[in-house]
Image (cartoon, grey):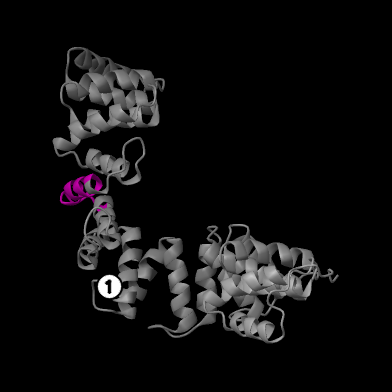
Amino acid sequence: MEEQNDELDVLKARAQNGNAEAQFDIAIKYENGEGVVQDNIQAVYWYRQAAEQGHAYAQTNLGDMYRLGLGVDQDYIQAENLYIKAAEHGHADAQIELSYMYHTGKGVVQDYTKAVYWYRQAAEQGHADAQFNLGNMYRRGLGVDQDFNQAAEWYTLAVEQGDMDARFELGFLYYYGEGVEQSYYKAAKLYRLAAYKGHAMAQIELGFLYTNGECVEQSYYKAFYWFTKAAKQGHAIAQFNIGIMYKNGEGVTQDKAKAVKWYTMAAKQEDAEAQNNLGFLYYNGEGVEKSYNKAFYWFTKAAKQGDAMAQFNLGDMYRFGINVAQDKAKAVMLFTHAAEQGHTCAQDTLKDMDSNGEIGVVGGGETKK
């Protein structure tokens, strides 16, 4: 401990004598509480001393302190200015922080063109996050013309550095043949690499590959395994698909009570398909006590999100007055919304209602219990 204090005293002396590297080092110690009592105000002071001498790392870290409001009042303009100074000296971390600000519009006017510019500066220095994000910008056409070839090239560079998100996105491009030659095999390989590292969306896509038998031997068991991995991370799509597998007995013993459990988890995250399917189980009393009230609740939630199946199911409840005042006008409106999305049962129902003279009837019916 004594030796450490001696080293700290030497470092402080060098810092007080104007050595920028020492000022930066002591700021790090104060920020992280390394050998000193953690003190963001002192960290800011020493970062500022080094930053004013043009120390790019200090400028970047001081920018972080202003952006996060640590040891100073939060000030995005100061953060932006400091990042620019460091970025213009080629500091990749500053370049990518600046990119994030322009990309998200956090504290600055959102500017995709500037975001692309700084992502590129960092990406060309081999910064994996920048390469990944630049790939995203090309894929989505943000700040640049959409270019799947460029997206694939930048994702590939990030993948070569082990970037997990890039593996997933590049896998997605191979799956659909966007910017690369279509290959389920390469998609599966990339999804698997990301999935084993805990990437939830890769785990889900791998689950779909096993469900459909695309470039892998069809296996509901393996699909269930990967969906479960993602579901345990709280991913609604995975929870919904586990619900389907329990309902249908695919890869697991059929258990509609467990289907209700998993649908509920996804439905509470506003997954419209899960809300509709949960409503259906409550409507029919499958795996749960029958409840038209709960069926109506979940169908309504899903229908408001534009789910065609839920619009049809809710329309049916209004048409026949099932646990709600009969209202054929609302039923027609809901059937129409579903029909416009190509729901054939809704289209046929509208034809039947028209031939039966039900269209144009306004509410007024009794409620069926």
Magenta segment: 114-128
With respect to residue 55, does 202 lie above or below? below
Q: Is 285 displayed left or right of 50 in the figure? A: right
Report the residue at 74% width, 72% height from top. 317
In front: 253, or 246?
246
117 within the magenta span: yes
Residue of label 1:
178
With respect to residue 107, does 195 lie above or below? below
Report the residue at 62% width, 78% height from top. 252
Quadrant of the frame with the N terminus: top left
- Say which element carries label 1: loop
Q: Position of residue 4 (x, y in %)?
A: 31, 21
Q: Position of residue 201 (x, y in %)?
A: 44, 64
Q: Is 258 displayed left or right of 233 in the figure? A: right
Quadrant of the frame with the C terminus: bottom right
Res. 286 visible in picture: no
